[in-house]
Amino acid sequence: MADVIETFGRYVQKQIPKRPNYAGGLLLTAYRAYGFALKTFPEKRLTDAKQYLAAECMDCIVRPLAHPGDQVLTSMFMPCEAFFAAGLLPMCAEQYSTYANGAGAEHAFIEAAENAGIAETFCSYHKTVTGAAISGVLPKPAAIVNTSLACDANNLTFRKAAELTGAPQFYIDVPYMPCEDAVDYVADQLRDMTRRLYDVTGRKTDEAMLRSLVQNSRKTMAIMRDIIGLKRDRYVPTDLTSELYEALLWHNAMGLPKALKYAEKLRADLLKSREKPGRKILWMHTNPFYQKTVQDIFNWKRDPWIALTELSYDNLVEMDEKDPYRAMAARAVYNYYNGPVSRRAERAAEVAYETGADGVILFCHWGCKETCGASTVIEKTVSDAGLPVLVLNGDGVDRRNSSDGQMKTRIGAFLEMLEGRR
Amino acid sequence: MIYTTCKYVPEELFSGFGEKVCRLDPNPVSFSCADGCSHPNLCGFAKAVIEEVKAQDIKTLIFTDCCDAMRRTFDVLLCDGIPFLYLLPLPHKTGTAETSFFAADLKKLADAYAEYSGKSFSWERAYAACFENVEKADGSDKYVSVLGAHGGKMLIDRVRAALPTVSVRDETCSSDRFFKKSAFGEAPKDERAFFLWYARLILSGLTPCMRMYDVKERGGLFDEERQKRRTGIIYHTMKFCDYYGFEYSDIKGRARVPVLKIETDTTPQSSGQLKTRIEAFGETLGVKKYADAPASAEIDALYVAGVDSGSASTDAVIMDKDRKIVGSTVIPTGMSASKSAAEALSLALFAAGLGRERLAAVVATGYGREAVDTNRQTVTEITCHALGAHFLFPNARTVIDIGGQDSKIIRIDREGNVLGFVMNDKCAAGTGRFLEMQARALGLSIDEMSLMGLSWKNDVRISNMCTVFAESEVVSLVAKDTPVSDIIHGLNVSVAEKTASLVARGGGGPGYAMTGGVAKNSGVVKCLSEKLGAPVMTSPRSQLCGAVGAALIALSSLEKSNV
């Protein structure tokens, strides 16, 4: 399979500079085919919930790519219920880049961006999608909507994509200090955004549907909280890719029945499980799902087990569903990536305790100053809480920025250390 | 003294307390402390701030929420017990709601400082201080502009030193902090109104930096008046700051004047490379004139020499008045650039059968050009490579020079004049040194590597561009019994991709000629030609290109002085 993807990726990459529309079409066809394969021949090593998750995530990229006229290009941290309530299809930029890597085609996009003068040190999730816009592969969406959360790249990628595609851009400024005034301010911006989206797309937000979607979000989040505790003593198999799928579904599909259904299925799988987990890892930030060395260590393993990924709980905050706009705003404002890093670090220590993690791996994705800069504070806070931390440098998308040998040695030594503590 | 890190810090607010403000502009020698307590991938300025705070006894420091790196730097410094360390949230938008939000945050800062210092705040004094920072009328002189990310005084001084005869203007994000006159509006009547007025002045009166949502006002930096007066743009980016690469990408294609892109990290490192680039840029702009050559009455009987003192090799060429190369040599640059240059010159003279007294002019170029005791003139290798390439390949329009420690792309016209150039940043990826290290890992000589790279069978990818990581990738491939020729091909493709990317960045087009030591590596040349989709010319004398150019400059200046 790896060879097929590599050959396909090379072919697509050759087409990108010459025939961008054709290359975009090839990618969409590949995603469709893979989505069909996931539904027809699901990965047997995964439980029902994770098989469902993989298929639904593929749908989250295929539909907006197939219907760019309905697509809203957005970031992972944007609450999306209002788009669904207006019949629009959000497409997450980070997901676009991750799938480009999955198709073996990210390099041509990164190259296009760097050739245009974009810094080599720019986050590769954002560089890939920027490169897709520069090379003309990214279709023009109906609109581009992004928040200032959780990193600087949001201020650049979406503005550039708007300039290049000609799509209207709406920017939701999330104040740095989490507080109720900030929630009001973001809620106002969200209300205004839906009005302006109507002006440019002709799609009106169905307020009743919006309330229902936000109720779904609340129910999903309640189950997500249960899941953290259930993972303490119960094991269900996972792999690096599923961890990213889960993060995507619980961000950009939050509110949809499928996000709720997945949460219910995962809880059911956990309740059914009689297997005890081995060394449990809390994985912070994204992961290098494509890197075989890391796959070999974690995929479908009971010991060590990635019990939880930070991106599956960063938006688990209290929200009042009576006002759907305030509820969505609260998810952005109180997201643990916002504000001083102490919030994120302390939350990691709490969650690690709740899920009974044996250690924490903090993945410093190349070019992410947000997480790299936070690493020493997180390391200290979590270590002070009594848990070992491994700060692991790598790249979630760009294969050029990671070293297999170093990765293997570091993770291996860390796991040996955890074994010694048991 | 109150220290600040960003132009959006409300400096005038502290005049309301009778305090003086100083914006940090640090230039640490290294990041030994910052790399330890934060992360190496933070931007140079953020790390420099950490170094400065640790080195100086700074008691009052104000940050804004300007970027990821500064937010995290603030978090790191929180552990240091600085008596007054404050982060002021800064909106990305500048509308009414954001202005009100920012006004409230300015008031909170004033209250916090009043509580800390025990001093009282006078909004009238703060208001009056704003008028000291009103934009001033410009002069009308022509100038070279330094644009982009914070470079600080050290960078501007270096640019001025390298371009001594032109006016240089700092237009980077941290240059003079002036408010637009139009942003002042109606005077506030009380303290509450002052904070709102002041918030609006800061958000709308300063030239927006790239982190703001609406950067249309930055267009002022490119208005007609400035465009007319600018003779060149030196566009500066800061290592690991991504904001200004985007603006550079926007302007590089549409600027009406030559643009030079440089990158620094606030430390004094790489000053040699920076000097070369800026001087070469000056030569492109016609700023720096070559020094007068020595007068020589009997030019016919005399010869000239060009010496290229590079990081890996020192090359010398002896040329007669008819531009014929009569002697040349290439020797490794040893520990001393000046000794190697003297030796190369002697060997070239020996090859030509001439004595030193027959040389009427010597021009030195390359990194060690200042160390070469020619007692004559020095010219950057950019100009020399352009002329040398034009001499060796009259149809060349894009010169690709891959040397020992850097790669350059030089666009030239029909006469060999430089139209523009780009260089790789301080990283060995894609240079001769990169290939040398991989050859060493494979236990091969460079010549063996060059030959073996042509007989590959399977397309092996070397994904790492980092020299050290790539070496470990090569070692892993060897361990998996991957044929050596396939690995070499993978390395060649990797260098070709990096180079092609640089060609694209420099706007190079067909008429490609390759110079420098790596031009001898047929595997790389073939891969590069495939990647560029056009033939790449090479010559057995490719490595002498810089020295040939230097000799041509020597000859030309000799002829001028004898007209």
Image: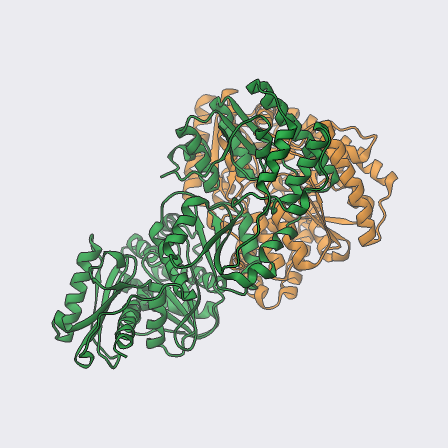
Q: In the image, B100: left or right of B386?
A: right
Q: Which is nearer the eye, B74 or B322? A: B322
Closer to the camera in the image, B219 or A130: B219
Q: Is residue B173 left or right of residue B418?
A: right
Looking at the figure, which quarter contains the C terminus of chain B? bottom left
x, y (%) of residue B301? 16, 80
For the question of whether residue B296 can be seen, the reply is yes
| Near-viewer residue (A89 or A271) | A89
The location of residue B79, given as percent across then percent down, is 49, 24
Quarter location, residue B421: bottom left
In this image, A43 relative to B267: left or right?
right
Q: Is residue B539 above or below residue A296?
A: below
Image vertical order of residue A55 relative to residue A387, above or below? below
Drawn colour of chain A?
A: orange
Q: Which quadrant of the structure image shows residue A130?
A: bottom right
Q: Residue at x 39, y 29 (%)?
A: B55
Q: Position of residue A225 (x, y in %)?
A: 69, 27
Can residue B455 be seen in this snapshot?
no
Image height of B219 relative to A331, above or below: below
**Which color is chain B depicted in?**
green
- Please say which color scheme the image uses: by chain
Viewer-closest of B18 and B374: B18
Q: How many marks?
A: 0
